[in-house]
Amino acid sequence: MYASVVIVVCLTFTLYKMEMEFIFRRFSNPSVGPHIRVETMKPEYSYKNISTLWNAMDRLINNQSLYPDGEFVDEAIAALRKSRIIRADIWGARVSTSSYKWQLTLEGGQKVLFKPAIVNITNKERTSDCVSGCEHPQYEITGFTLNRLFKLKNMPYATGRRLSWANEIEPVATDALLNATIVLEDGDVCVKWACYQMRPKTYCFKKGVIEGAIIYWLDNRLVRERYQSKGTAHHEFHVRGRRLDEFQTLMPGEKDFCQEFRQIRTYRKDNTFGHVLDMAVVDYIMLNYDTKHTYIANNCSKAAINLNIIVDYGLSFCPVDDVILLAPIYQCCNIRRKIYDALLKHQFNFTKVFLTATSDDPLFPLLLEQDVIDMHNRLRTILALVNICMKKYGEEGVVLDI
Protein backbone atom coordinates (compact mmCIF):
# COMPACT_ATOMS: atom_id res chain seq x y z
CA MET A 1 0.00 0.00 0.00
CA TYR A 2 2.65 2.48 1.07
CA ALA A 3 4.88 1.53 -1.86
CA SER A 4 2.05 2.36 -4.27
CA VAL A 5 1.37 5.70 -2.59
CA VAL A 6 5.03 6.67 -2.69
CA ILE A 7 5.34 5.71 -6.39
CA VAL A 8 2.30 7.78 -7.36
CA VAL A 9 3.47 10.76 -5.32
CA CYS A 10 6.99 10.55 -6.75
CA LEU A 11 5.63 10.58 -10.30
CA THR A 12 3.62 13.68 -9.44
CA PHE A 13 6.70 15.37 -8.00
CA THR A 14 8.57 14.92 -11.27
CA LEU A 15 6.33 17.56 -12.84
CA TYR A 16 7.61 20.13 -10.33
CA LYS A 17 11.29 19.19 -10.19
CA MET A 18 12.47 21.34 -13.10
CA GLU A 19 10.63 24.36 -11.73
CA MET A 20 12.15 23.83 -8.27
CA GLU A 21 15.67 23.53 -9.69
CA PHE A 22 15.21 26.73 -11.71
CA ILE A 23 13.96 28.64 -8.65
CA PHE A 24 16.89 27.38 -6.59
CA ARG A 25 19.42 28.50 -9.21
CA ARG A 26 17.89 31.97 -9.39
CA PHE A 27 18.15 32.40 -5.65
CA SER A 28 21.65 30.97 -5.42
CA ASN A 29 22.99 32.98 -8.37
CA PRO A 30 21.36 36.41 -8.92
CA SER A 31 23.02 36.71 -12.33
CA VAL A 32 20.97 33.82 -13.72
CA GLY A 33 17.56 34.62 -15.18
CA PRO A 34 15.09 37.31 -14.13
CA HIS A 35 15.33 38.34 -10.51
CA ILE A 36 12.77 37.28 -7.94
CA ARG A 37 11.98 40.04 -5.47
CA VAL A 38 13.04 38.85 -2.05
CA GLU A 39 11.47 40.33 1.08
CA THR A 40 14.43 40.62 3.41
CA MET A 41 14.34 41.47 7.09
CA LYS A 42 15.30 44.85 8.50
CA PRO A 43 19.09 45.08 8.71
CA GLU A 44 19.07 46.82 12.10
CA TYR A 45 17.10 46.48 15.30
CA SER A 46 15.33 49.60 16.51
CA TYR A 47 15.82 49.19 20.27
CA LYS A 48 18.34 51.73 21.56
CA ASN A 49 18.81 49.75 24.76
CA ILE A 50 19.47 46.17 23.73
CA SER A 51 18.46 44.90 27.18
CA THR A 52 14.97 46.18 26.40
CA LEU A 53 14.79 43.90 23.38
CA TRP A 54 16.01 40.84 25.30
CA ASN A 55 13.42 41.55 28.00
CA ALA A 56 10.71 41.94 25.37
CA MET A 57 11.67 38.59 23.82
CA ASP A 58 11.35 37.09 27.28
CA ARG A 59 7.99 38.69 28.11
CA LEU A 60 6.38 37.62 24.82
CA ILE A 61 6.79 33.93 25.66
CA ASN A 62 3.46 32.33 26.57
CA ASN A 63 1.91 28.87 26.75
CA GLN A 64 1.29 28.89 22.99
CA SER A 65 4.57 30.18 21.58
CA LEU A 66 8.14 31.29 22.15
CA TYR A 67 7.75 34.25 19.81
CA PRO A 68 4.97 36.29 18.17
CA ASP A 69 4.08 36.81 14.53
CA GLY A 70 5.32 39.80 12.59
CA GLU A 71 8.35 42.06 12.39
CA PHE A 72 9.38 41.65 16.02
CA VAL A 73 10.97 38.31 15.16
CA ASP A 74 13.00 39.96 12.41
CA GLU A 75 14.27 42.55 14.88
CA ALA A 76 15.20 39.81 17.34
CA ILE A 77 17.07 37.91 14.63
CA ALA A 78 18.91 41.08 13.58
CA ALA A 79 20.00 41.64 17.19
CA LEU A 80 21.27 38.08 17.49
CA ARG A 81 23.31 38.59 14.32
CA LYS A 82 24.80 41.97 15.22
CA SER A 83 25.03 42.39 18.98
CA ARG A 84 28.50 42.73 20.45
CA ILE A 85 29.87 39.66 22.23
CA ILE A 86 31.10 40.32 25.77
CA ARG A 87 32.03 36.77 26.80
CA ALA A 88 32.82 33.51 24.98
CA ASP A 89 33.17 30.11 26.61
CA ILE A 90 33.31 26.54 25.37
CA TRP A 91 30.28 24.32 25.92
CA GLY A 92 32.27 21.23 26.81
CA ALA A 93 32.07 17.56 25.96
CA ARG A 94 30.73 16.85 29.45
CA VAL A 95 27.55 18.64 28.45
CA SER A 96 27.35 18.03 24.71
CA THR A 97 28.68 15.04 22.79
CA SER A 98 27.41 15.49 19.25
CA SER A 99 28.47 19.01 18.40
CA TYR A 100 31.21 21.51 19.14
CA LYS A 101 29.48 24.46 20.83
CA TRP A 102 30.25 27.76 22.49
CA GLN A 103 28.20 29.71 24.97
CA LEU A 104 28.31 33.40 24.15
CA THR A 105 27.07 36.33 26.19
CA LEU A 106 25.86 39.28 24.15
CA GLU A 107 25.72 42.91 25.20
CA GLY A 108 22.80 43.39 27.52
CA GLY A 109 23.47 40.04 29.17
CA GLN A 110 21.62 37.73 26.78
CA LYS A 111 23.21 34.27 26.51
CA VAL A 112 23.17 32.32 23.26
CA LEU A 113 24.44 28.98 22.08
CA PHE A 114 26.79 29.14 19.10
CA LYS A 115 27.29 26.05 16.96
CA PRO A 116 30.30 26.52 14.65
CA ALA A 117 30.10 24.87 11.25
CA ILE A 118 33.04 22.52 11.65
CA VAL A 119 32.08 20.54 8.53
CA ASN A 120 30.72 21.69 5.18
CA ILE A 121 27.08 21.01 4.29
CA THR A 122 28.34 18.71 1.54
CA ASN A 123 29.84 16.48 4.25
CA LYS A 124 27.17 13.99 5.31
CA GLU A 125 29.40 11.45 6.97
CA ARG A 126 27.09 9.41 9.17
CA THR A 127 26.63 5.98 10.64
CA SER A 128 23.51 4.02 9.73
CA ASP A 129 21.69 4.96 12.94
CA CYS A 130 21.17 8.56 11.74
CA VAL A 131 22.05 10.04 15.15
CA SER A 132 25.85 10.04 14.86
CA GLY A 133 28.41 12.30 13.24
CA CYS A 134 28.89 16.06 13.23
CA GLU A 135 25.99 18.44 13.51
CA HIS A 136 25.30 21.06 10.86
CA PRO A 137 24.28 24.44 12.31
CA GLN A 138 22.54 25.24 9.01
CA TYR A 139 20.01 22.56 9.89
CA GLU A 140 19.14 24.33 13.15
CA ILE A 141 18.31 27.45 11.15
CA THR A 142 16.31 25.34 8.71
CA GLY A 143 14.32 23.89 11.62
CA PHE A 144 13.55 27.35 12.96
CA THR A 145 12.50 28.52 9.48
CA LEU A 146 10.06 25.61 9.11
CA ASN A 147 8.85 26.29 12.65
CA ARG A 148 7.88 29.80 11.54
CA LEU A 149 6.42 28.76 8.19
CA PHE A 150 4.24 26.14 9.86
CA LYS A 151 3.11 28.53 12.63
CA LEU A 152 4.40 26.23 15.38
CA LYS A 153 6.45 28.90 17.17
CA ASN A 154 7.92 26.50 19.72
CA MET A 155 11.58 26.41 18.66
CA PRO A 156 14.07 29.01 19.97
CA TYR A 157 15.26 31.76 17.63
CA ALA A 158 18.10 30.55 15.40
CA THR A 159 20.12 32.42 12.79
CA GLY A 160 23.47 32.30 11.07
CA ARG A 161 26.40 34.49 11.99
CA ARG A 162 30.02 34.91 10.91
CA LEU A 163 32.45 35.70 13.71
CA SER A 164 36.01 36.99 13.64
CA TRP A 165 38.20 35.09 16.08
CA ALA A 166 40.70 37.94 16.42
CA ASN A 167 38.20 40.78 16.75
CA GLU A 168 35.11 39.28 18.39
CA ILE A 169 36.05 36.09 20.25
CA GLU A 170 39.67 36.06 21.41
CA PRO A 171 39.48 39.35 23.40
CA VAL A 172 36.54 38.04 25.48
CA ALA A 173 37.28 34.29 25.48
CA THR A 174 37.63 32.30 28.69
CA ASP A 175 40.81 30.37 29.41
CA ALA A 176 38.95 27.14 28.68
CA LEU A 177 38.09 28.30 25.16
CA LEU A 178 41.57 29.72 24.52
CA ASN A 179 43.25 26.53 25.70
CA ALA A 180 41.06 24.43 23.41
CA THR A 181 41.89 26.52 20.34
CA ILE A 182 44.99 26.60 18.14
CA VAL A 183 45.76 29.69 16.05
CA LEU A 184 48.07 28.94 13.12
CA GLU A 185 50.56 31.36 11.56
CA ASP A 186 48.39 31.82 8.48
CA GLY A 187 45.50 32.96 10.68
CA ASP A 188 43.51 29.73 10.57
CA VAL A 189 41.85 28.79 13.85
CA CYS A 190 41.68 25.08 14.67
CA VAL A 191 40.00 22.86 17.24
CA LYS A 192 40.20 19.15 17.93
CA TRP A 193 36.84 17.50 18.40
CA ALA A 194 35.20 14.09 18.34
CA CYS A 195 31.71 14.27 16.91
CA TYR A 196 29.30 11.74 18.35
CA GLN A 197 30.57 8.18 17.77
CA MET A 198 33.32 9.52 15.50
CA ARG A 199 37.10 9.57 15.95
CA PRO A 200 38.67 12.88 17.08
CA LYS A 201 39.71 15.14 14.21
CA THR A 202 41.18 18.60 13.83
CA TYR A 203 38.82 21.12 12.26
CA CYS A 204 40.02 24.52 11.07
CA PHE A 205 38.29 27.80 10.25
CA LYS A 206 39.99 29.63 7.39
CA LYS A 207 41.53 32.99 8.28
CA GLY A 208 39.86 32.90 11.66
CA VAL A 209 36.36 33.45 10.26
CA ILE A 210 33.95 31.16 12.05
CA GLU A 211 30.52 30.50 10.57
CA GLY A 212 27.77 28.99 12.65
CA ALA A 213 24.30 29.21 14.14
CA ILE A 214 23.31 31.51 17.00
CA ILE A 215 20.54 29.93 19.09
CA TYR A 216 18.59 31.89 21.69
CA TRP A 217 19.28 30.62 25.20
CA LEU A 218 16.20 29.73 27.25
CA ASP A 219 17.73 28.89 30.62
CA ASN A 220 16.59 31.19 33.42
CA ARG A 221 13.53 31.96 31.29
CA LEU A 222 11.86 28.58 31.11
CA VAL A 223 12.51 25.58 33.30
CA ARG A 224 12.29 22.69 30.93
CA GLU A 225 11.36 19.11 31.70
CA ARG A 226 12.38 16.33 29.37
CA TYR A 227 9.36 14.11 28.98
CA GLN A 228 10.18 11.56 26.29
CA SER A 229 12.17 9.27 28.53
CA LYS A 230 12.39 6.46 25.97
CA GLY A 231 13.44 8.49 23.00
CA THR A 232 11.56 10.15 20.21
CA ALA A 233 7.85 9.96 19.60
CA HIS A 234 8.21 7.83 16.49
CA HIS A 235 10.50 5.55 18.52
CA GLU A 236 7.76 5.19 21.14
CA PHE A 237 5.38 4.30 18.37
CA HIS A 238 7.34 1.25 17.27
CA VAL A 239 8.88 -0.07 20.50
CA ARG A 240 5.87 -0.27 22.81
CA GLY A 241 4.29 -3.58 21.88
CA ARG A 242 5.16 -3.76 18.19
CA ARG A 243 8.28 -4.19 16.12
CA LEU A 244 9.31 -1.69 13.49
CA ASP A 245 8.63 -4.10 10.62
CA GLU A 246 5.07 -4.61 11.92
CA PHE A 247 4.44 -0.88 11.73
CA GLN A 248 5.67 -0.72 8.18
CA THR A 249 2.95 -3.19 7.18
CA LEU A 250 0.08 -1.51 9.02
CA MET A 251 -2.53 0.38 7.06
CA PRO A 252 -3.29 4.05 7.78
CA GLY A 253 -5.82 4.52 10.53
CA GLU A 254 -5.49 1.18 12.32
CA LYS A 255 -5.87 3.12 15.54
CA ASP A 256 -5.53 0.40 18.18
CA PHE A 257 -1.95 1.29 18.99
CA CYS A 258 -2.66 5.01 18.77
CA GLN A 259 -5.30 4.55 21.46
CA GLU A 260 -2.75 2.71 23.59
CA PHE A 261 -0.32 5.56 23.05
CA ARG A 262 -2.87 8.12 24.24
CA GLN A 263 -3.10 6.19 27.53
CA ILE A 264 0.52 7.03 28.35
CA ARG A 265 0.21 9.69 31.02
CA THR A 266 2.25 12.32 29.19
CA TYR A 267 0.22 12.04 25.97
CA ARG A 268 -3.25 12.23 27.49
CA LYS A 269 -3.13 16.01 27.23
CA ASP A 270 -4.33 17.29 23.88
CA ASN A 271 -1.59 19.89 23.56
CA THR A 272 1.17 17.32 24.17
CA PHE A 273 -0.36 14.82 21.77
CA GLY A 274 -0.77 17.57 19.19
CA HIS A 275 2.88 18.44 19.66
CA VAL A 276 3.83 14.83 18.83
CA LEU A 277 1.89 15.13 15.57
CA ASP A 278 3.68 18.40 14.76
CA MET A 279 7.07 16.86 15.47
CA ALA A 280 6.33 13.96 13.15
CA VAL A 281 5.70 16.38 10.28
CA VAL A 282 8.86 18.43 10.80
CA ASP A 283 11.01 15.40 11.56
CA TYR A 284 9.94 13.70 8.36
CA ILE A 285 10.37 16.76 6.17
CA MET A 286 13.91 17.21 7.56
CA LEU A 287 14.63 13.47 8.01
CA ASN A 288 15.52 14.07 11.64
CA TYR A 289 15.79 10.91 13.74
CA ASP A 290 17.29 12.71 16.73
CA THR A 291 14.29 14.47 18.29
CA LYS A 292 14.93 13.62 21.90
CA HIS A 293 15.33 17.05 23.48
CA THR A 294 11.67 17.96 23.71
CA TYR A 295 10.52 19.66 26.85
CA ILE A 296 7.41 20.92 28.58
CA ALA A 297 7.72 24.22 30.40
CA ASN A 298 7.33 23.56 34.11
CA ASN A 299 7.75 25.63 37.27
CA CYS A 300 7.92 28.92 35.43
CA SER A 301 5.62 31.90 34.92
CA LYS A 302 1.98 30.91 34.58
CA ALA A 303 1.90 32.37 31.08
CA ALA A 304 4.30 29.71 29.77
CA ILE A 305 3.33 26.56 31.69
CA ASN A 306 2.79 23.50 29.46
CA LEU A 307 4.47 25.07 26.44
CA ASN A 308 6.06 22.26 24.41
CA ILE A 309 9.56 23.21 23.29
CA ILE A 310 11.70 21.52 20.67
CA VAL A 311 15.42 21.96 20.01
CA ASP A 312 18.30 20.20 18.29
CA TYR A 313 17.94 19.62 14.55
CA GLY A 314 21.67 19.54 13.83
CA LEU A 315 21.69 15.89 12.72
CA SER A 316 18.85 16.16 10.20
CA PHE A 317 18.87 15.12 6.53
CA CYS A 318 19.89 11.58 7.28
CA PRO A 319 20.38 9.53 4.09
CA VAL A 320 17.69 7.12 5.32
CA ASP A 321 14.23 8.21 4.14
CA ASP A 322 11.80 6.18 6.25
CA VAL A 323 8.07 6.77 6.54
CA ILE A 324 8.24 5.46 10.13
CA LEU A 325 8.93 9.06 11.12
CA LEU A 326 5.28 9.71 10.24
CA ALA A 327 3.96 6.91 12.47
CA PRO A 328 1.96 9.30 14.71
CA ILE A 329 0.28 10.76 11.62
CA TYR A 330 -0.63 7.60 9.76
CA GLN A 331 -1.39 5.43 12.79
CA CYS A 332 -3.63 7.97 14.49
CA CYS A 333 -4.85 9.40 11.19
CA ASN A 334 -4.64 12.82 12.79
CA ILE A 335 -2.89 16.10 12.08
CA ARG A 336 -3.27 19.52 13.67
CA ARG A 337 -5.18 22.07 11.65
CA LYS A 338 -2.58 24.84 11.84
CA ILE A 339 0.15 22.68 10.35
CA TYR A 340 -2.21 21.04 7.86
CA ASP A 341 -3.28 24.46 6.59
CA ALA A 342 0.39 25.46 6.28
CA LEU A 343 1.20 22.32 4.29
CA LEU A 344 -1.69 23.00 1.92
CA LYS A 345 -0.61 26.62 1.54
CA HIS A 346 2.94 25.69 0.56
CA GLN A 347 2.39 22.45 -1.35
CA PHE A 348 3.20 24.10 -4.69
CA ASN A 349 5.51 26.96 -3.68
CA PHE A 350 7.48 25.54 -0.76
CA THR A 351 10.86 25.71 -2.50
CA LYS A 352 10.44 29.38 -3.40
CA VAL A 353 9.05 30.30 0.02
CA PHE A 354 11.84 28.53 1.90
CA LEU A 355 14.56 30.15 -0.20
CA THR A 356 12.93 33.55 0.19
CA ALA A 357 12.73 33.14 3.96
CA THR A 358 16.41 32.21 4.27
CA SER A 359 17.95 34.32 1.50
CA ASP A 360 19.25 37.02 3.86
CA ASP A 361 20.80 34.61 6.35
CA PRO A 362 24.60 34.98 6.56
CA LEU A 363 24.98 31.24 5.86
CA PHE A 364 22.73 31.19 2.77
CA PRO A 365 22.29 28.83 1.00
CA LEU A 366 21.58 26.79 4.09
CA LEU A 367 21.05 23.54 2.22
CA LEU A 368 22.12 21.70 -0.86
CA GLU A 369 19.77 22.11 -3.80
CA GLN A 370 18.63 18.49 -3.63
CA ASP A 371 17.82 18.77 0.08
CA VAL A 372 15.42 21.65 -0.58
CA ILE A 373 13.74 19.74 -3.40
CA ASP A 374 13.47 16.63 -1.23
CA MET A 375 11.85 18.62 1.59
CA HIS A 376 9.21 19.81 -0.88
CA ASN A 377 8.62 16.24 -2.04
CA ARG A 378 8.23 14.94 1.51
CA LEU A 379 5.77 17.74 2.32
CA ARG A 380 3.58 16.49 -0.49
CA THR A 381 3.98 12.89 0.68
CA ILE A 382 2.51 13.91 4.04
CA LEU A 383 -0.48 15.46 2.30
CA ALA A 384 -0.95 12.27 0.28
CA LEU A 385 -1.06 10.19 3.47
CA VAL A 386 -3.47 12.62 5.12
CA ASN A 387 -5.72 12.36 2.06
CA ILE A 388 -5.81 8.57 2.48
CA CYS A 389 -6.92 9.06 6.07
CA MET A 390 -9.57 11.57 5.02
CA LYS A 391 -11.09 9.06 2.62
CA LYS A 392 -11.60 6.77 5.59
CA TYR A 393 -12.58 9.20 8.35
CA GLY A 394 -13.41 12.49 6.64
CA GLU A 395 -11.69 15.80 7.32
CA GLU A 396 -13.46 16.31 10.66
CA GLY A 397 -12.15 12.97 11.90
CA VAL A 398 -8.58 13.65 10.83
CA VAL A 399 -7.81 17.37 11.23
CA LEU A 400 -7.74 18.38 14.89
CA ASP A 401 -8.32 21.85 16.35
CA ILE A 402 -6.11 21.28 19.38
Image (cartoon, helix red, strand yellow):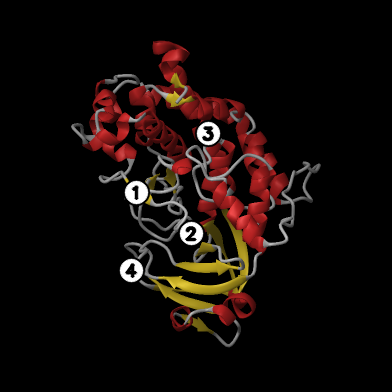
- The residue under the point 26% across, 34% down is 265
Q: CA distance from mark 3 to mark 2?
A: 22 Å
Residue under numbered circle 1: 225
The correct choice, above or below, for 138 with respect to 187 in the image is: above
The answer to which of marks 3 and 1 sits earlier in the sequence is 1
The answer to which of marks 1 and 4 sits earlier in the sequence is 4
Which three-letter amino acid code belongs to the residue tagged 4?
Arg
Residue toward you, 114 or 241: 114
Q: CA distance from mark 1 to mark 4?
A: 20 Å
Q: CA distance from mark 2 to mark 4?
A: 25 Å
Q: Residues within 10 Å of mark 2 (few under 14, many from 20)?
A: few
| Residue 2, x across and y down, in percent | 37, 25
| Residue 46, x across and y down, in percent | 74, 55
Which three-letter amino acid code belongs to the residue tagged 3?
Asn
> Of discs 3 and 4, which sits in the foreground?
4
> Of discs 1 and 4, which sits in the foreground?
1
> Of discs 3 and 1, which sits in the foreground?
1
Position of residue 111 in the picture relative to residue 35 (left or right): left
Which three-letter amino acid code belongs to the residue tagged 1?
Glu
Q: Residues within 10 Å of mark 4 (few under 14, many from 20)?
A: few
The answer to which of marks 1 and 2 sits earlier in the sequence is 2
Position of residue 208 in the picture relative to residue 239 (left or right): right
The correct choice, above or below, for 241 with respect to 81 in the image is: above
The answer to which of marks 3 and 4 sits earlier in the sequence is 4
Residue under numbered circle 3: 377
The correct choice, above or below, for 207 with respect to 354 in the image is: below
> For the C terminus, which image quadrant?
top left
The answer to whether the residues at label 3 and label 2 have Cβ atoms under 8 Å apart is: no
Residue under numbered circle 4: 94
Q: CA distance from mark 3 to mark 1?
A: 34 Å
Residue toward you, 314 or 67: 67
> Of discs 1 and 2, which sits in the foreground?
1
